[in-house]
């Protein structure tokens, strides 16, 4: 009896299953949020939900785009549900149809069609349209596409179908291939769904096409209606309260259960059945897209691999003229074998080709990232670090087990990268080369800006909400935040904004181009993925981002830009021009003691990577003495090691305070190089493998999980596994936890060893240049702005501290770029001063245009120096405003004119230019009254000069603002930065200075690092989170701060722990207001003799003054500002 | 007679024009939106003492004091008040002009008076401006004033002198002005900036420079302004008082104390005004009545009209109605001896367009708009009725319906005052405001409050089979639906109730009556287990 019961229960269950199979359903009308600002679910959410609901398959077709396809495909593969790729085409005339390609040819045609409409649209004109996501797709294009290849089509009727029933477009579209065309009946819960369905099904019958049941889903669950309404308002630029009928009336555009659909479609069961039929017809999968690397451009007489071997051999000879080390030969053989096995030769050759091009154009470049693991890359000249020196593993770069393409990143000079990019486009054509996309997602900033608008608050509120923000951009502002901004966090509207922001953050907003990831294909690229025009002229990019490319197994070359390479090349050029020494990356003398000494003193302003606050603190502690120390230096000040609390153990062990020991014998090999402390990304990953028993694939998944933008639960799962695995194998739980934290930190800003090594090389080169050719290096940095941490003012004052004379911008001496100038030798300067002085270039003058300066220079070269403003204006013929800018920038000082007198003269000339005398009367044009220039204008005070300098040149060679204030009796109680070093630990001290750098690293739990500068140097301030909250306004807004606190020392690194912060910005106005007349006369009379106009020493300038009344907030202090 | 000009400057005009702060100590600021957010353009004393002042961003001000009383700058109101002040100072001189401003949106408000030959009436120039400043001060308005021989120096002294009031004898301009900053010359802001660059801060520093040198560098501006300030170039005040377009006025020989006889006088004046209007083919949009009593107290009334009117009877009726309303408060005291009627706003009237429907003014009235064949006379009559209703009951009492884009049926129309122009449908253009319904889908009669009904229906979303409304049972023979209308979820944040999702059904009962019924809430989402849904009858189809 009982058995029987069980049996019947089982039977019933089976029966139920049976029923479900028979009346199953496949959703084919969903869109994702890659239909930007229309869909309200991620593709993966849509796929997961479909799987949950027991759908047989899911097709997500976004509006005129294939951007979300790979994500959906990947998610479907993981979830175990079939994904059908397609696109929803919406024409300009409003005809909407979904296309599902039956095969690769059809897919290619679809992709090409989408590329075409995007590429042909002039990007400017199209910009407005793209916002509403309609493109220049014509109905004819769709008809043509349907004739080209085999598709299944789903016609989506509009809301109002009265006119649609005899729409000629529908009739025309359904003229052929009727068996592949479906008409969508969707449950909108409108006023008359039943009537609508019966009309539509009659229409379908009339046209002999099929009907299809579908959710026409905008989101995966009903709860997302709120978000859908929100993004719709953002798309349409309307307020929620005014959007009206533009929004959906209800929340029914979600994926419904199969049972419910059965009930809804009980009159049209074949509509449900047809969904399965359609799904069965569309057997195409993205897996079928096989990517092929181009190999057509190489020597046809041999295979790519033979060519690669030949080139490598040549490279070896070049790199090792004395014969190749045996160890390296072994590595090379191994690598070449692996490359052959995986058939990557063409990829290496393509990269080689690009590098060759750059070398030919004298563009500095260097491979970075994991490519530095490869000896082949080293021999081909792609990377510059000898991998055999560092024991780097080629398998980190390419491996047979990990089925993923290698990723070569190359840095080029940032000013000349475009040449390389255009070379690639030119060589392979637009249809075969494209830049990868970056999906721009909503961050708290962008989300709140939009939301405040659609809610109907003033944009001011958004400004207020974001004004104090230093957040990660991934969370909406917190309650405390809002209170601080003077907003009521309980105000319902603001609450709604915060809630919606929480939902919206992380949603894709639009596609943009990746910084430089190139995809190059053998077949036309637009058959794989649509190509779009980028906002930048002459750029085009594809719809997939780098993760998508990974999934699709497509190779990508990162063509990146690095400002430091530009600066280094410029330094080489300057050295070659002025010292007659030719240098390049490879010929810089290695292991130079002076250079390391300088780094150990933390004199690293302008040096690549190690110029940041944190790095500068680390330098004296780590005391780098050789190249590998630099590799560690670069890698150690990263979120990974800091979060993993690995920094201090390493330093202790390095100093010999702590014994070097390994958590276990098996980890000794992994951690040997770094004294038993894991510092590099690959070490952390190796620990996961060696110590926690992860498979290599798992450890890689772990790394990827970290990098994912939205924190899912996946990480924690891995974390538990890692910790459990390590404890099981006998490691201390604490060590395990630290390792995991470190991996977490690596996720976002990981530095693998090879990458650190590539960077370390640039650190060394730039440090060497700074040490031996400080003038040239500073000039090169100034010419490569904007780059690096420091503003020109800091770079120049740092150079002056290195005994480099800085000469002002001068109408007769300066070039456009800053340059070097040999100083006349006079007594006393050989010993201490640098023989070369830095001459500031006209580029430093704010707002001046290059072509004007070129005119000025050409005339000067052709017909000699200018002897007056009028002469300059007449001969060079530059514009009035340019001349005025030069006068304001004090460029005429060498002619004995103060900036006021120069401007006076300029105005006389320029008014004439503005209203030229009629030629008829030119004979009568009176010569300018002779008293024109000798007008008695009040001399500028030094303070005024400095302010003017900063506002026109962003720096002043005449004096430091703090120094001036001190001279006027302000800030007297504060210590100078030069006294800072001598302070005892625990001592109470006060300093003041201009804020040159504010940092709040994500790893430092709300601690703010400030760097203040005065005339004697800069000092480091640490503001703990609680003090920061107390003095928030001053710290964020102040430009001149006075800080009292306690001195903290560790070794030679001195910090001031802020206890009290005073915003002294208002004092800056005193520079203008203060009347000083200490009897030393005006500037003109006080120029150093023999150097008139060529160099102004900072300590010998005093001036008369006058009163002024401007408040500091409106002063043109542009040069003094630092960004937060 | 040498010209004498008085310049008045109201340094705190913007603040003083705004409503008073909630309490005297409240910190009040006036803000104006500019590029990059709201900026404070004026702050009261209390706020100033707190470090909040003009030029700051509102955000910064709020950060200093979150309880700041913030008012939006209302340029129209501010200008209007200035014009009022200008009229009022007409007591000193009939020749009044607005003060010079650097730019149109500059917030320096002031007035200029030509007081040549007027001063002796007030006991001299000094006494005149003393009186003026005091009178403004009594009204809580801070004023600074000066008298000089020309506009330039009077303006400069009013704005830049250290003293509250200055009287400068003719011929002493150079001495008096040379210590003032160059801005006092009323020169172009660009030239002010340029002067600053040259270090030329005071007018005195401009004096030694040769005039051709100045012209060459600054253009005519500085030289001209210097000439004006030093009395070497002529400049005149542009008077602001515009004569009213239509004005009738009568002095009564015998002061009248009883309303009927006053009304009679008004009636006569109306005839005269109407004749004036007719002659020019214009109609009044607003009539101002002013009754002056023998003790110089005045009573003023204003009646607006929905259409330009010139019909004396109509105007008189409106005035009478209004006087009727104020009757209880009307106190003729010793009698009214002067009556005036002014038509301040007028518009052209085309009387000959009889019977031709023209929409320029009338489209605002949807009811009228529908009547295509009505004659002009009827329209006039209708407008008359409308004016009278509004005149008696207030502008808000007469409303009309306009469509509003909303899915929620009861929010799909809005009432607006009959005289107001509907908001331009900028929004609707963008957001597809066309209701997507046919006349079969929405009922003709929509109840203001839906009525509860008892319903028998299939769970979860089947149509009602029968329902009971006002005790009557209706058997359904035909049903369409559900039409699902979600709540306007965002309205909660604006302090409105949002309600539940509704399922609407169109029903026809066995008698052929058609109903619009909804269930409030969905079974699986909004209704907790075992809660029965509520049903409502929301409307009737014809």
Image: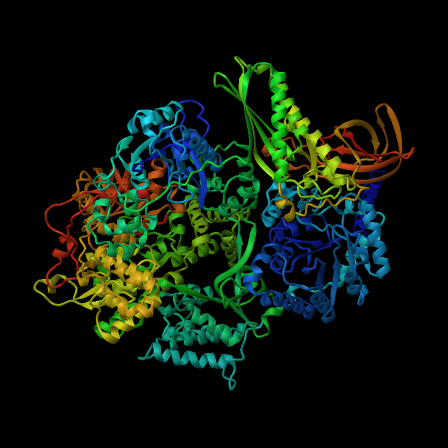
Looking at the image, how many numbered discs can be counted on the residues?
0
Q: Residue A760 versus residue B248: which sits nearer the camera? A: B248
Please identify the residue farthest to the top as the structure is shown.
B334
Q: Residue A611 versus residue A855: which sits nearer the camera? A: A855
Residue A907 screen position, x and y as percent: 28, 58
Give the residue drawn at x 10%, y 50%.
A1080
Q: Quadrant of the N terminus of chain B?
A: top left
Please identify the residue farthest to the left as the structure is shown.
A827
Q: Is residue A227 above or below residue A863?
A: above
Residue A1085 screen position, x and y as percent: 12, 56
Q: Quadrant of the C terminus of chain B?
A: top right
Give the residue drawn at x 21%, y 47%.
B205
Give the residue drawn at x 56%, y 46%.
A504
Residue A655 visible, this angle = no
Q: Quadrant of residue B147?
A: top left
Q: Is residue A194 above or below residue A381?
A: above
Q: Residue A595 versus residue B495: which sits nearer the camera? A: B495
Q: Residue A190 versus residue B440: which sits nearer the camera? A: B440
Please identify the residue farthest to the right as the structure is shown.
B511
Q: Is residue A493 left or right of residue A53?
A: left
Residue B88 screen position, x and y as percent: 43, 29
Please identify the residue farthest to the bottom as the structure is shown.
A301
Q: Is residue B501 above or below residue A912?
A: above
Q: Is residue A855 left or right of residue A798?
A: right
Residue A504 visible, this angle = yes
Q: Is residue A405 above or below residue A1053?
A: below
Colour scheme:
rainbow
Residue A115 screen position, x and y as percent: 61, 66
């Amino acid at each position: 009896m009982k058995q029987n019961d069980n049996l019947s229960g089982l039977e019933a269950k089976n029966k139920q299953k049976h029923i479900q199979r028979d009346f199953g359903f496949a959703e084919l009308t969903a869109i994702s949020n890659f239909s930007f600002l229309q869909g309200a679910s991620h593709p993966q959410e849509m796929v997961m939900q479909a799987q949950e609901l027991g759908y047989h398959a899911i097709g997500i077709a976004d509006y005129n785009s294939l951007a979300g396809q790979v994500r959906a495909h990947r998610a479907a593969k993981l979830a175990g549900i079939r994904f059908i790729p397609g696109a929803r085409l919406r024409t300009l005339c409003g005809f909407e149809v979904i296309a599902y390609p039956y095969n690769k040819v059809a897919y290619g045609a679809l992709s090409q069609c989408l590329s075409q409409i995007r590429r042909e649209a002039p990007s400017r004109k199209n910009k407005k349209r793209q916002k509403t996501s309609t493109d220049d797709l014509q109905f004819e294009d769709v008809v043509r596409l349907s004739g080209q290849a085999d598709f299944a089509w789903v016609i989506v009727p509009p809301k109002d179908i009265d006119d649609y029933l005899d729409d000629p477009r529908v009739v025309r579209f359904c003229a052929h291939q009727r068996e592949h065309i479906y008409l969508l009946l969707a449950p909108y819960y409108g006023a008359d769904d039943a009537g609508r369905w019966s009309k539509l099904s009659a229409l379908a019958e009339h046209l002999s096409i099929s009907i299809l049941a579908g959710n026409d889903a905008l989101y995966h669950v009903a709860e997302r209606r709120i978000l859908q309404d929100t993004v719709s308002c953002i798309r349409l630029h309307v307020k929620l309260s005014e959007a009206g009928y533009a929004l959906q009336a209800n929340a029914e555009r979600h994926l419904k259960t199969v049972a419910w659909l059965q009930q809804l479609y009980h009159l049209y069961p074949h509509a449900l059945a047809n969904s399965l039929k359609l799904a069965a017809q569309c057997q195409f999968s993205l897996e079928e897209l096989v990517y092929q690397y181009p190999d057509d451009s190489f020597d046809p007489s041999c295979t790519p691999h033979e060519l690669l071997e030949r080139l490598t051999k040549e490279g070896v000879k070049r790199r090792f003229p004395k014969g190749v080390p045996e160890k390296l030969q072994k590595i090379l053989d191994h690598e070449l074998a692996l490359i052959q096995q995986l058939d990557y030769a063409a990829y290496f050759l393509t990269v080689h080709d690009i590098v060759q091009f750059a070398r030919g154009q004298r563009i500095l470049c260097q491979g970075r990232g994991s490519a530095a693991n490869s000896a082949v890359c080293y021999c081909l000249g792609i990377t510059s670090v000898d991998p055999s020196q560092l024991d780097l593993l080629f398998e980190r770069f390419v491996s047979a087990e990990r089925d993923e393409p290698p990723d070569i990143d190359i840095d080029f000079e940032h000013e000349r990268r475009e040449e390389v990019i255009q070379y690639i486009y030119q060589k392979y054509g637009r249809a075969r080369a494209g830049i990868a996309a970056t999906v721009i997602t909503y961050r708290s900033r962008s989300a709140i800006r939009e939301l405040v608008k659609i809610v109907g608050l003033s944009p001011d509120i958004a400004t207020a909400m974001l004004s104090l923000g230093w957040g990660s951009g991934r969370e909406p502002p917190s309650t405390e935040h809002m209170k601080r901004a003077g907003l009521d966090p309980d105000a319902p509207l603001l609450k709604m904004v915060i809630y919606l922001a929480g939902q919206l953050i992380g949603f894709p907003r639009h596609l943009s181009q990746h910084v430089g990831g190139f995809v190059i294909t053998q077949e036309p690229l637009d058959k794989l993925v649509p190509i779009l025009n980028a906002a930048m002229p002459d750029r085009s990019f594809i719809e997939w981002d780098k993760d998508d490319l990974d999934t699709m197994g497509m190779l990508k070359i990162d063509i990146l830009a690095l400002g430091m390479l530009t600066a280094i090349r410029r330094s080489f050029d300057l050295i070659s021009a002025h010292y007659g020494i030719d240098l390049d990356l490879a010929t810089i003398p290695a292991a130079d003691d002076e250079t390391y000494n300088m780094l150990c003193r933390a004199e690293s302003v302008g040096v690549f990577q190690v110029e940041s606050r944190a790095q500068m603190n680390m330098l004296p502690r780590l005391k780098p003495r050789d190249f590998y120390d630099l590799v560690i230096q670069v890698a150690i000040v990263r979120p990974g090691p800091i979060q993993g609390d690995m920094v201090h153990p390493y330093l202790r062990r390095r100093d010999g305070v702590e014994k070097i020991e390994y958590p276990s014998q098996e980890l000794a090999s992994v951690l040997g190089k770094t004294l038993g402390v894991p510092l590099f990304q690959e070490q952390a990953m190796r620990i996961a493998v060696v110590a926690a028993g992860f498979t290599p694939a798992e450890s890689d998944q772990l790394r990827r999980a970290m990098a994912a933008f939205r924190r899912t639960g996946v990480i924690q799962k891995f974390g538990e596994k890692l910790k459990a695995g390590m404890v099981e194998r006998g490691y201390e739980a604490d060590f395990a936890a630290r390792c995991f934290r470190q991996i977490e930190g690596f996720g976002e800003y990981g530095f693998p060893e090879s990458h650190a090594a590539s960077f370390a090389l640039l650190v060394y080169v730039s440090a060497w240049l700074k040490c031996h050719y400080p003038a040239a290096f500073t000039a090169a940095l100034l010419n490569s702005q904007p780059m690096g941490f420091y503003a020109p003012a800091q770079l120049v004052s740092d150079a002056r501290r290195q005994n480099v004379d800085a000469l002002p911008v001068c109408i007769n001496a300066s070039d456009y770029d800053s340059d070097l100038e040999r100083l006349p030798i006079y007594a006393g300067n050989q010993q201490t001063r640098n023989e070369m002085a830095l001459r500031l270039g006209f580029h430093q003058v704010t707002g001046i245009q290059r072509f004007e300066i070129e005119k000025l220079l050409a005339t000067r070269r052709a017909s000699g120096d200018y002897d007056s403003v009028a002469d300059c204006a007449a001969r060079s013929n530059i514009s009035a405003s340019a001349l005025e800018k030069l006068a304001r920038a004090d460029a005429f000082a060498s002619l004995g004119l103060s900036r006021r007198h120069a401007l006076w003269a300029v105005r006389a000339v320029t008014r004439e230019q503005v209203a030229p005398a009629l030629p008829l009367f030119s004979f009568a044009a009176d010569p300018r009254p002779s008293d024109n220039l000798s007008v008695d204008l009040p001399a500028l005070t030094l303070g005024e000069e400095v302010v003017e300098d900063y506002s026109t040149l962003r720096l002043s060679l005449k004096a430091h603002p703090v120094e001036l204030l001190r001279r006027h009796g302000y800030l007297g109680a504060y210590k100078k930065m030069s006294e800072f070093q001598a302070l005892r630990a625990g001592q109470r001290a006060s300093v003041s200075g201009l804020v040159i750098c504010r940092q709040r690293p994500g790893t430092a739990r709300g601690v703010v690092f400030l760097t203040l500068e005065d005339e004697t140097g800069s000092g480091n301030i640490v503001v703990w989170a609680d003090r920061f909250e107390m003095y928030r306004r001053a710290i964020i807004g102040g430009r001149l701060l006075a800080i009292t606190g306690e001195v903290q020392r560790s070794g030679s690194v001195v910090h001031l722990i802020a206890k009290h912060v005073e915003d002294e910005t208002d004092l800056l106005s005193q520079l203008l207001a203060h009347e000083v007349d200490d009897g030393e006369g005006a500037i003109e009379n006080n120029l150093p003799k023999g150097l008139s106009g060529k160099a102004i020493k900072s300590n010998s300038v005093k001036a008369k003054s006058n009163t002024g009344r401007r408040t500091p907030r409106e002063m043109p202090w542009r040069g003094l500002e630092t960004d937060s | 007679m040498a010209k004498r000009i008085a310049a008045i400057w109201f340094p705190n005009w913007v603040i003083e024009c705004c409503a008073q702060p909630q309490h005297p100590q409240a910190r009040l600021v006036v803000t104006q939106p500019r590029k990059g957010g709201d900026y404070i353009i004026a702050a009261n004393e209390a706020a100033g003492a707190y470090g909040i002042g003009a030029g700051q961003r509102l955000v910064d001000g709020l950060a200093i004091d979150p309880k700041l009383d913030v008012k939006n700058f209302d340029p129209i109101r501010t200008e209007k008040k200035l014009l009022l002040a200008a009229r009022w100072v007409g007591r000193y001189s009939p020749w009044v002009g607005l003060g010079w401003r650097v730019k149109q949106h500059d917030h320096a408000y002031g007035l200029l008076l030509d007081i040549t030959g007027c001063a002796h009436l007030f006991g001299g120039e000094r006494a005149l401006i003393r009186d003026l400043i005091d009178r403004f001060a009594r009204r809580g308005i801070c004023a600074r004033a000066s008298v000089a021989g020309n506009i330039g120096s009077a303006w400069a002294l009013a704005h830049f002198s250290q003293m509250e009031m200055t009287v400068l004898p003719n011929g002493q301009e150079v001495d008096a002005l040379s210590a003032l900053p160059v801005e006092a010359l009323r020169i172009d802001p660009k030239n002010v900036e340029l002067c600053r660059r040259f270090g030329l801060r005071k007018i005195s520093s401009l004096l030694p420079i040769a005039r051709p040198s100045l012209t060459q560098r600054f253009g005519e501006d500085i030289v001209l302004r210097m000439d004006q300030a030093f009395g070497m170039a002529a400049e005149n005040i542009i008077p602001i008082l515009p004569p009213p377009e239509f004005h009738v006025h009568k002095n009564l020989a015998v002061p009248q104390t009883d309303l009927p006889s006053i009304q009679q006088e008004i009636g006569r004046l109306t005839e005269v005004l109407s004749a004036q209007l007719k002659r020019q083919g214009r109609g009044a949009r607003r009539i101002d009545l002013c009754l002056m009593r023998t003790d110089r107290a005045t009573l003023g009334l204003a009646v607006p009209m929905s259409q330009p009117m010139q019909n004396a009877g109509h105007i008189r009726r409106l005035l009478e109605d209004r006087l009727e309303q104020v009757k209880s408060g009307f106190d003729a005291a010793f009698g009214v001896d002067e009556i005036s009627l002014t038509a301040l706003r007028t518009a052209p009237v085309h009387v000959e367009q009889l019977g031709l429907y023209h929409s320029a003014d009338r489209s605002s009235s949807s009811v009228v708009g529908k009547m295509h064949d009505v004659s002009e006379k009827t329209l006039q009559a209708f407008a008359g009725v409308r004016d009278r209703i509004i005149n008696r009951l207030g502008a808000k009492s007469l409303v009309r319906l306009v469509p509003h884009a909303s899915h929620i049926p009861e929010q799909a129309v809005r009432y607006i005052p009959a005289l107001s122009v509907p908001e331009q449908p900028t929004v609707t253009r963008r957001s597809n405001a066309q209701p997507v319904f046919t006349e079969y889908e929405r009922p003709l009669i929509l109840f203001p409050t839906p009525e509860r009904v008892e319903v028998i229906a299939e769970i979860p979303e089947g149509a009602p089979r029968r329902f009971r409304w006002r005790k009557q049972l209706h058997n359904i023979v035909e049903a369409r639906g559900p039409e699902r209308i979600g709540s306007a979820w965002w309205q909660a944040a604006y302090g409105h109730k949002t309600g539940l999702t509704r399922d609407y059904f169109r029903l026809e009962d066995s008698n052929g009556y058609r109903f619009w019924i909804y269930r409030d809430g969905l079974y699986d989402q909004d209704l907790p287990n075992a809660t029965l849904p509520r049903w409502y009858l929301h409307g009737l189809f014809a």
